[in-house]
Amino acid sequence: MYYINDKQYTCSVSVTMDIFNDRWKLAVIWYLLENDKRFKELSKDIHEISQKTLTIKLKELEEKNIITREVFAEVPPKVVYSLTPIGMKLKPLLKEMFEWGIEYVKENGKITDENACSSSICWD
Amino acid sequence: MYYINDKQYTCSVSVTMDIFNDRWKLAVIWYLLENDKRFKELSKDIHEISQKTLTIKLKELEEKNIITREVFAEVPPKVVYSLTPIGMKLKPLLKEMFEWGIEYVKENGKITDENACSSSICWD
DNA sequence: TCCATTACTTACATAAAGGTAAGTAAGAGA
DNA sequence: TCTCTTACTTACCTTTATGTAAGTAATGGA
């Protein structure tokens, strides 16, 4: 049995699913795997997300120790987000998602330009 | 660039995320990795899901060619769900989720009985 | 003095996801 | 005839997620 704070899980897969059960958190991780990023950079990377939601998701990821928030005492403000060691360990998961996605599209869709996103930048 | 029906994606990760962006679909896959299952078995496995939602999720997975629905002409009805080949290929992804979950709990939670779920049955 | 900048916060509103409870079909067995 | 069974469907409702648009703080530069 697994416990996180007061929550109980009988399987570690449900721990992971419980954290990443929204549209955005894994997208944030994906972009932070490229580089540490400022708020605005993430906002551009994931351009469909609203400021408000990005703020919420970053806060949730920070609370869960998956990312780090570093504030610089500058004006205008500068805040840099980066992955913690456990955050970094999500890389193989993202890689599986990347690879399964390609397999899936091969069978159920079309690929016009395989290198639109090598594995470095992109998201929809 | 990737296309599925009319939808456009610049990255295959977003294809995968777009399919599994809810609380339940990956749970269904997980249990179908064990065995082919009848509706009621899945309903017991994922006991927190409502019948209605399970019905919807199974329909969505079938439409996306990730699972197969086999109807037996019996009374009471018998319907068996199973993974398609592309559905089977989700196994490494689930395995990564399983393993990352353990790592995460080691750092941020407690494990009382590591074998509550070996890797065969369970979900929360 | 005024505007631009960044990283937010707040109030308000909508959409999506999910739940509950009841109903249905069609035979088998008591 | 009545009840049980499975795999749903339907109507209605609640919760959660997300969006929009405006506002804020603090400073530098025109």
Image: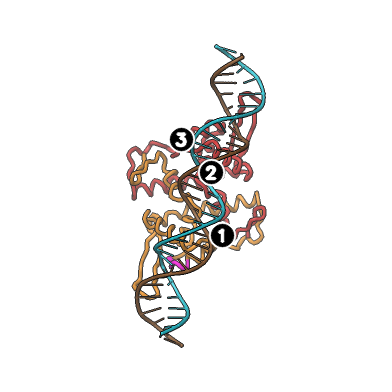
Chain colours: A red, B orange, C brown, D cyan
User: Which chain is home to disc 2?
Assistant: A
Rounded to the nearest angstrom, the CA distance separating label 1 from label 3 is 34 Å
At 64% across and 31% down in the image, what residue appears?
A71
Callout 1: SS:
loop
Q: Which mark is residue A25?
A: 2
The quadrant of the picture occupied by the N terminus of chain A is bottom right
Callout 2: SS:
helix
Q: Is residue A85 visible?
A: no
Residue type beneath disc 1: Asp
Mark nearest the camera among 1 and 3 is 1
In this view, C14 is above or below B62: above
Q: Which residues are magenta?
A: B36-41
Residue type beneath disc 2: Lys
Task: Tell me where residue A118 sits by quadrant.
Answer: top left
Rounded to the nearest angstrom, the CA distance separating label 3 from label 2 is 16 Å
Q: Which residue is mark 1?
A: B124
